[in-house]
Every structure is written in structure tokens, then in C-alpha cells.
Image (cartoon, rainbow, N blue to C red):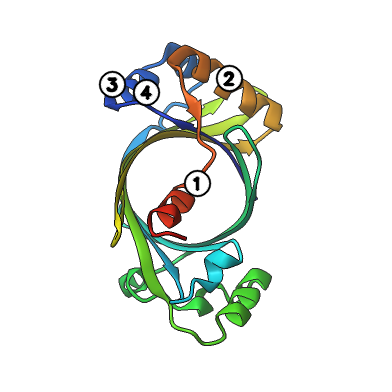
Amino acid sequence: MEIELKYKVRDKESIAAILADDYLAGMEEKGTREQILMKAAYFDTEDYILSKNDVAFRVRMEGARIIASLKWKDSGSNGLHIREEINVPVDDPGCFLRPDPAIFKESEVGKDVAELLNGKPLQSILEMTFLRSRFRVDTGEVICEVSLDDGDIVTDQGELHLSEMEIELFTGETDGLLEIGRVLAEKYGLVPEAESKYARGLRLIGQ
């Protein structure tokens, strides 16, 4: 399960300010800070059978790594997103162009997805490229990863700029996550982001 807070960030200057924030610096785990270029492609059938069943099939290049993911059952409110997720490392770069659903065959959700697809071919329906700056924080009660993303969602029907902060809970209770989000939202005038990146991309293509 993935539990994270999402906030819209106004601009690059706001991203830089959050990355230099003293409140976060006091909790930061040393040696965890990094910048990484990410490129993601989302796949579905021609008739969007996966998105109609609230399933996202993503292949993402994270620097030199390739990760295939399934996400489903997204819930939550006021910027809090709670969803089921499975991630599988992939060695074949061709997966980014033509992923094989059998990647997930060892999981129950993978079997469910195979039944949904029923042999229908997958195609890329949208892509996104963004620079992620991230690091871990440890409050003593929760451990989270703070990520600042700046980039674009790209579809055949148009593009959408994305500038946002995600705070993902690794260990601890959700209340601790919400407190970090509250402090930063008040400090930087952040607005909760109700939609995932994928949902915004689907809206661009009319889905």
C-alpha cells in the first residue's frame, strides 16, 4: 500500500525554497538527498479497459533503473492518497515501449489484470518526464520521503505542466504525515492536489 500527500507547488522558486527549508533540514536523514530524472509511460488498451476499472499500468525509467508498476483503489481526501501498489524491477529496456502484462503474473492483481486484458494489446496512452528532488525525513515517529517534481505530462491531445510536492509515508502513523504536510502547506501556501499525475493525464485525453 502507498500512502502519500500531494500538494501543488506554484513555481521553481517555491520548489527551491522547500528544498532549503529549515524545518525539513532538522529532520532530514543525511545521505538520502538526490535528484533523478524520471520518464514514465502509462499503458492501456484501445478501449481503456484498465482505466475504466481504476487500474494504472506504468513503466518508469528512474535514472538507469526501470520499474513496472500497477496501482489501483486510489482513495483519500484533501491531498491524501491511499492506494494499492505493486512494483517490479525490469531488466529489458523494451518494456518501456511494449510491456508484457506477464511481468506481474506472480501476484493476484497481475492475474486480475490479465483477465481484464483478455489478450488485448497494450499501447502507450500518455507519458510524463520530470526532475525529482527527494530526501527522507525522520521525526522520531514517522519516516517519510519528501519529493519535489517539476516537469510535464505529454499526450497526443496536449501537454500539462506539473509542479508538485509529494510526501510518502514509509513507517509510522498517518497523523505524523499529515502534520508535516500541514506545516509546509501553511508556510508555503500549498494547495492540496486531489488528482494523481495519471488522473490529470487521463483528463487531458478525455478519459
The residue that appears at 32% across and 74% down in the rendered structure is 94
Residue 52 or residue 169, whichever sits in front? 52
Residue 164 or residue 199, whichever sits in front? 199
- The disc, 2 or 4, on the residue closer to the chain's N-terminal end is 4
Vertical placement of residue 64 versus 184, above or below: below
Cα distance in 3D space between marks 3 and 2: 20 Å
Residue behind mark 4: 19
Residue type pointed to by label 4: Leu
Residue 15 or residue 121, whichever sits in front? 121
Residue 169, by quadrant, is top right
For the residue carrying disc 4, how many other residues have a C-alpha within 10 Å: few (<14), some (14-19), or many (20+)? some
Q: What label sits on residue 13 in the rendered view? A: 3
Residue type pointed to by label 2: Arg
Residue type pointed to by label 3: Glu
Tag nearer the camera, 3 or 4: 3
Residue behind mark 2: 182
The residue that appears at 66% across and 41% down in the rendered structure is 76
Tag nearer the camera, 2 or 1: 1
Residue behind mark 1: 196
